[in-house]
Structure formats: structure tokens, C-alpha cells
Amino acid sequence: MHTPVLLKEAIDALAVKPGGVYVDGTLGRAGHAREILSRAGTGSRLVGIDRDTQALVECAERLGNVPGVSLTLVHGCHGSIAQIVRDEGLDAVDGILLDLGVSSPQLDEPSRGFSFRADGPLDMRMDRSHGETAADVVATRDEEVLADLFRSFGEEPNARRIAKAIVKTRSATRIETTVQLAELVERTVGRHGAHHPATRVFQALRMAVNDELGELQRALEGGMGLLKPGGRFAVITFESLSDRIVKKFFAAHAGAMVSLQQGGERWEGEFPRARLVMRHAVTASEKEVLANPRARSAKLRAIERI
């Protein structure tokens, strides 16, 4: 079962209003969405977006019995949030939530290829209806590109060695499964510490296959323009790369008052202006991490349009 991370903290950060209009840009299994609708109550509206068709089917069942609310489920990417919301006839919303990363059901299903805990096809697509798989990327990118990918998206210190080993191996046999790739990485760099040596490589491939950083940047830019004055934008991240993008984007819109040589001061920042709901990222409590280890790396940031 998928357990929503930082559930209370995220919904509190949205400051949900009765009868409000909200967007869950990464619907998942609807844990956060259900709580938003519960607090917003009768007359509220939720647009839920996800690129995983199976998630949408399950969400329709889980949210279909919430009375007195308007619910729209859309198959799409959160990077297209502005277009999707406007296509639904909405000009502005009271709040937006993004819960990034991979859901527990996706990780636990071997056929999705996100994890090497069980053998499965090296897929990693969140939307299996189109696009390259991780196996395609491993089979077609040259050594330089693979090394840069592992370095940039996985912050992998052995990126070059792993890329070289992949290119050498694939000349004899196609790398098609999660265990094949994980074992290749382990043979190449050895195993040290608690984490499997292929962890960063799998993260990098997943982020590349799904263009996660590009989708995030587009979602932040599009979402800010949708917020009503007083509307809030909350984002939960699980990797330092994603968190840095959110932190930098929110800081730019929060801006700063700059002193002028001639006296007085002036606000400098990106428009629309906003204020940080919390100065620092919120992380999961020790109790939540014990109950749900996936919450260990989660960080929540939120901003309010002013």
C-alpha cells in the first residue's frame, strides 16, 4: 500500500480553504488528494494529474465516493499543468501540490523496472504508453553521454567507469533487465556501505527517461502563474537535485529588499511576488520515518503568492 509522505505537513502548508480549487499535479494513489478534498469539503474542486494510467484508474475508485466535490482526473505530465488547468476552464486556483519521485506501487511492481530488488524489464517509464525505456537509453547512448547522465542526474562518482563497462558489455549482449544492470554496476565498482552501488545509476536513468527535472521546472513556472493572490504551492522532493531547483525557484519569487545608495530600498525578484511559507524545508519526523522509511529523504517547501 502506498503511504503518502508528509501528509499532514503538506496539506497544512496548502492552508486548504472550504470550497477551494486545487491541483494535485502528481496524483499517485490519491493519498494527498483525498485529504485536500476532505478539508475543502462541499463545493470544492480538484484537478488531479498523473502520467501513470494505472494510478488514474485506482484514483477514480478511491475518490469517486467523496460527496459534494468536483473531480477531474487528467492523463498528462505536471510540466503541462498550466495548459491542463486552463483547458478545464480555470484561470486561477487556490493551491497546487507536487509530490515528486516514484510511488511505492511503482517501486514494488517488478514489471515497471524502477527497482533492482526484484528482476524485471529495464523500463522506468512513468507513462508506459510512449517514449524510450531505460534499456533503450543504455543500449544507444555513447560512453560520454552515459557518463554525463550518471554524473549529472545521479551524482555518481564512478560515472565514467560504469559507462565504460556498460558500453563494453552491450557489445556482446543487450542489457534488458534491472538485475543485469545492477550486477554489472556492482562488478564494476564493488560494494561498500549500506546502499547498493547501482542506486545512483538507477536514479539517473529514471530521471532521464522521464525528464523529471525538465518537468519540474515547467511545472513550477506554469503553476506560479495559476495561483490566486493568497494561493499556495507546496512541493515534496526526494532528491537533492530536485530540492535545489525548488529552493532556488521559490527564493527567486520571494525576492529580497535591497538597499539603495541614494537611500531607501527596493524589492528585487521574479514575478509574481510571493512569500515563503517556511524558511527551511520540512522533513519527516522520526516516527514517520520508522513507519515509512521512504519518508527519510523527503523535503517539503511551500510558497504563497502575494
Image: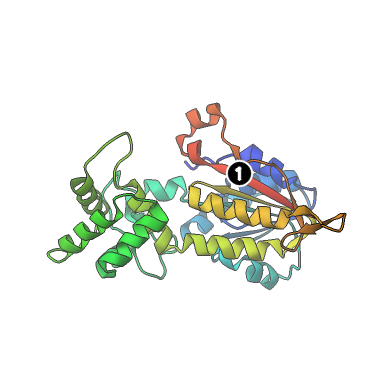
Q: Residue at coordinates 59% horizontally, 53% vertically from top-left?
A: 246
Q: Which residue is mark 1?
A: 300
Percent of width and height locating residue 197: 29, 44
Q: Residue at coordinates 62% horizontally, 60% vertically from top-left?
A: 220
Q: Residue at coordinates 42% horizontally, 68% vertically from top-left?
A: 129
Residue type pointed to by label 1: Leu
Estimate how packed mark 1 is, as few (under 14), some (14 to 19) or many (20 or more) residues with alpha carbons within 10 Å: many
- Residue 245 in which image quadrant: bottom right
Q: Residue at coordinates 55% horizontally, 49% vertically from top-left?
A: 243
- For the image shown, how many numbered marks are present on the structure? 1
Out of 80 and 87, give the one closest to the viewer.
80
Percent of width and height locating residue 117: 30, 43
Q: Can residue 114 be seen here?
A: no
Out of 56 and 262, give the one closest to the viewer.
262
Percent of width and height locating residue 40: 75, 48
Is residue 145 toward the left or the right of residue 79 in the image?
A: left
Percent of width and height locating residue 91: 76, 68
Is residue 272 toward the left or the right of residue 177 in the image?
A: right
- Residue 269 in which image quadrant: bottom right
- Residue 207 in which image quadrant: bottom left
Q: Residue furthest left?
A: 172
Is residue 208 toward the left or the right of residue 81 in the image?
A: left
Q: Is residue 147 above or below residue 187?
A: below
Out of 56 and 32, give the one closest to the viewer.
32
Out of 184 and 36, give the one closest to the viewer.
184
Is residue 30 toward the left or the right of residue 153 in the image?
A: right
Which structural element holds mark 1?
Answer: strand
Q: Can residue 302 be seen here?
A: yes
Quadrant holding the C terminus:
bottom right
Display colour scheme = rainbow
Q: Is residue 113 above or below residue 191?
A: below
